[in-house]
Image: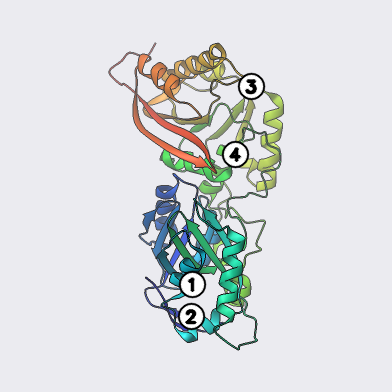
């Protein structure tokens, strides 16, 4: 349990000061690695959560501004096991906070996010917690901080919200389709594929271009929220705004070898427009190209990674069509991928692609399940069997 030692509006000292980030289920390891890369902090994972030590609050500001895999960044005050009962859960959450700490927190605005089965909803929890805190003090001064309560099944996390918004949303994600991946998931695919800037990567079925855009942002070190600098940490301390200038100075002008293809011209147009809004259109090679033409775009064994989301059998698309897409992609991947190259595929159902890949001399290196809300996706990473002759 972490609790406040001292609470001052311009500077706080915490006992074992920690930050937490909230992520989509399945993205915990991606976020942990990203935090390690950003601030050199070794996090611990809980379902939909990464908890990590911070030396100063500016580190949490950096995480909120630059990390591509997270939904919210919070300065942790307390973490407890809760029950289904509202009053009992709130009492457990604030039980060990000192009177002084409770005074400091009593005039903050409270947001609550809840996942799981409970005998209360998020609005009821926030309202009851606010009332409980106000009963602890006669203080009338409203603070600049917002309290955030995240409840996931039997765990509750209380902290100061450094985000003030859903960090998983992208201001450049305008021209999309119903099946387009969220930015956080698109970034996760590149990280699961172990993408390194400079490698030749190809998305042959780009839809709205999210995979290539997230890869380009990562490669250029351009903060994912570069064009949307409204964060609640600015209200906590004016000096925290310096994080924007500091991180923006790290932006690189060029990112090479990112290819975004699709057989539909409208998808290419939409991808280009989204990339332009994100400020990375010059870093991505767009082309109206069918999957079956990859061997005309790239030399034999020249591509490092193919990363894409493919359709699955559904009411809108039958097995014959899906099978043809999978067969063609595997055939092309076998030709264009380097000997140590990988094929990373995201699908709603993955048994068919696994069967086809195995028959075509690909071995599965990794399989992960990731979520967008309640929607489950399978991510499979395949590698060519190098002892097989490439036609």
Read off the residue under disc 3. 263
Marks 4/3 in contact by CB < 8 Å: the verdict is: no
Q: Is residue 286 above or below residue 274?
A: above
Residue 97 drawn at (x, y percent): 44, 79
Which x, y percent locates residue 117? 49, 51
Q: Compared with residue 198, is residue 386 higher up or lower down, i.e. above or below?
A: above
Instruction: Say whether disc 1 or disc 3 marks the residue closer to the N-terminus.
Output: 1
> Does residue 198 show up?
no
91 vs 105, nearest the viewer: 91
Task: Work out how far the residue at label 4 is from the one at label 3, CA to CA, in angstroms.
Answer: 16 Å
Residue 241 falls in image quadrant: bottom right
Q: Which numbered tag is attached to residue 57?
A: 1
Q: Which residue is mark 2?
A: 12
Badge 1 marks a residue whose secondary structure is helix
- The mark found on residue 210 in the picture is 4
In this view, the residue farthest toward the left is 387
Q: Secondary structure at mark 3?
A: loop
| Residue 170 visible, this orientation | yes
Q: Secondary structure at mark 2?
A: strand
Asked if the residues shown at circle 4 and circle 1 are in contact, with their CB atoms under 8 angstroms apart, the answer is no
**Which is more foreground, mark 1 or mark 3?**
1
Q: CA distance from mark 4 to mark 1?
A: 31 Å
**Residue 273: x percent and y percent?**
71, 39
């Amino acid at each position: 349990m972490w609790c406040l030692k001292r609470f001052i509006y311009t500077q706080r000292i915490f006992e074992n000061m920690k930050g937490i980030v909230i992520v989509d289920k399945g993205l915990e390891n991606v976020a942990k690695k990203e935090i390690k890369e950003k601030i050199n902090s070794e996090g611990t994972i809980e379902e939909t959560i990464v908890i990590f030590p911070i030396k100063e609050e500016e580190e949490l500001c950096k995480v909120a501004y630059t990390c591509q895999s997270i939904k919210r960044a919070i300065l942790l005050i307390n973490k407890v096991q809760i029950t289904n009962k509202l009053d009992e859960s709130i009492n457990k959450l604030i039980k060990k906070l000192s009177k002084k700490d409770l005074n400091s927190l009593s005039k903050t605005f409270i947001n609550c996010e809840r996942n799981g089965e409970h005998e209360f909803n998020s609005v009821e929890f926030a309202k009851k917690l606010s009332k409980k805190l106000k009963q602890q003090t006669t203080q009338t001064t409203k603070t600049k901080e917002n309290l955030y309560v995240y409840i996931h099944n039997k765990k509750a996390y209380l902290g100061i919200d450094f985000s003030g918004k859903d960090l998983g949303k992208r201001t450049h994600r305008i021209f999309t389709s119903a099946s387009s991946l969220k930015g956080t998931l698109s970034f996760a695919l590149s990280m699961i594929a172990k993408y390194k800037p400079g490698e030749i990567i190809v998305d042959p079925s780009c839809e709205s271009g999210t995979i290539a855009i997230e890869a380009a942002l990562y490669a250029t070190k351009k903060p994912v929220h570069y064009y949307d600098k409204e964060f609640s940490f600015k209200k906590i301390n004016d000096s925290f705004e310096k994080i924007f200038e500091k991180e923006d100075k790290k932006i690189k002008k060029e990112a090479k070898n990112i290819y975004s293809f699709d057989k539909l011209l409208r998808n290419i147009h939409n991808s280009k427009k989204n990339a332009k809004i994100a400020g990375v259109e010059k870093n991505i090679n767009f082309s109206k190209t069918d999957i079956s033409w990859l061997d005309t775009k790239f030399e034999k064994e020249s591509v490092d990674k193919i990363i894409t989301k493919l359709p699955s059998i559904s009411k809108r698309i039958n097995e014959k069509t899906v099978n043809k897409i999978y067969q063609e992609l595997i055939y092309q991947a076998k030709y264009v991928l380097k000997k140590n190259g990988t094929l990373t595929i995201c699908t709603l159902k993955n048994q068919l692609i696994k069967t086809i890949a195995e028959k075509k001399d690909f071995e599965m290196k990794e399989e992960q399940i990731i979520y967008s809300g309640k929607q489950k996706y399978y991510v499979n990473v395949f590698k060519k069997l190098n002892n097989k002759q490439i036609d």
